[in-house]
Amino acid sequence: MGEKIQKLKRIKKIKKIRIHREGTDTLIYSAMILIAVGIILWRSFDSHVPFFVFAAIFGPIWCVVLNFFRCPIRLYGTDDTEKLVIAPADGHIVVLEDVEENQYFHEKRKMVSIFMSLWNVHANWFPVDGTVKMVKHKNGKFHKAWLPKAAEENEMTDIIITTPDGTDILCRQIAGAMARRIVTYAKEGDTCYIDEHLGFIKFGSRVDLYLPADTEIKVTMGQATTGNQTVIGILK
């Protein structure tokens, strides 16, 4: 427990940064380009109409990208997370069903899928405390993330986490039609905690959880989730 408290103190310090590090370069370079073009338009024409048209179009687009790379300060409200599964992402529940998971577990599992739109925060959090057992990236297609075939055919990264009591949880980052880059911070053998970032997916995507069949699910279809805040389920 002492180790986790120290982790939480470190995370509190890190999360004072409100823009995710994955977006820093994108935001800075795009802002520099927009400012340069804006100066050229302002100085090159007698009328300032081209400048205002440019600003009216690309200013809001830049703000949307800024919103996308938000990194809100979030800590789960209690250290008592031993049996909890917490939402790894912002978004909406688009799949909630029992499935046969035959790639790793070869047994029936509860599948919970969270779809992240362009308007959601795209940081991903660890859903449980434990140890990272496996990290595996798979190249694939870029179907729309909410389609059923996305869970099998899209580019993805699978992370299996073993909880302190020995339960294995699969967390799957899935790229979408617009998302072309999955970033995964989890490394095999690492100790991980709720409140820590698992990774990041750029511009629209999905995160799936494969939980034990006897997990008590606490969310419903279509429900909005808040990463590192919403309780997805309770492990038995």
Image (spheres, rainbow, N blue to C red):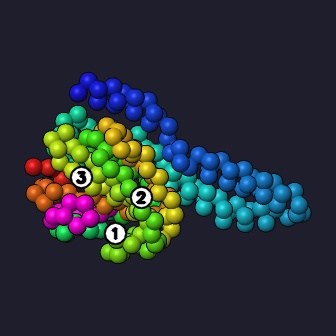
Tell me the chief SS of the magenta region: strand
Task: Name the front one of labels 2 and 3.
Answer: 2
Residue 181 position in % (x across, y down): 51, 59
Q: Amino acid at mark 2?
A: His
For the residue carrying disc 2, how many other residues have a C-alpha within 10 Å: few (<14), some (14-19), or many (20+)? some
Q: Residue 187 vs residue 24: left or right?
A: left
Residue corresponding to mark 2: 137
Range drawn in magenta: 102-114
The front one of 189 and 197 is 189
Residue corresponding to mark 1: 151
Residue at 50%, 37% in the rendered image? 17
Quarter of image, res 205: bottom left
* Separation of marks 2 and 3 at Cα, in angstroms: 16 Å
Dot 1 lies on which element? helix
* Separation of marks 2 and 1 at Cα, in angstroms: 13 Å
Of labels 2 and 3, earlier in sequence is 2
Q: Residue 14 vs residue 7: left or right?
A: right
Residue 3 position in % (x across, y down): 29, 26
Of labels 2 and 1, earlier in sequence is 2
For the residue carrying disc 1, how many other residues have a C-alpha within 10 Å: few (<14), some (14-19), or many (20+)? many
Image mark for residue 169: 3
Dot 2 lies on which element? strand
User: Is residue 111 in the magenta section?
Assistant: yes
The vertical placement of 201 against 19, above or below, is below
Quarter of image, res 132: top left
Residue at 87%, 56% in the rendered image? 43
Q: Amino acid at mark 1?
A: Ala
Q: Residue 144 vs residue 55: left or right?
A: left
Q: Assess whether mark 1 and mark 3 are in contact (beta carbons under 8 angstroms).
A: no
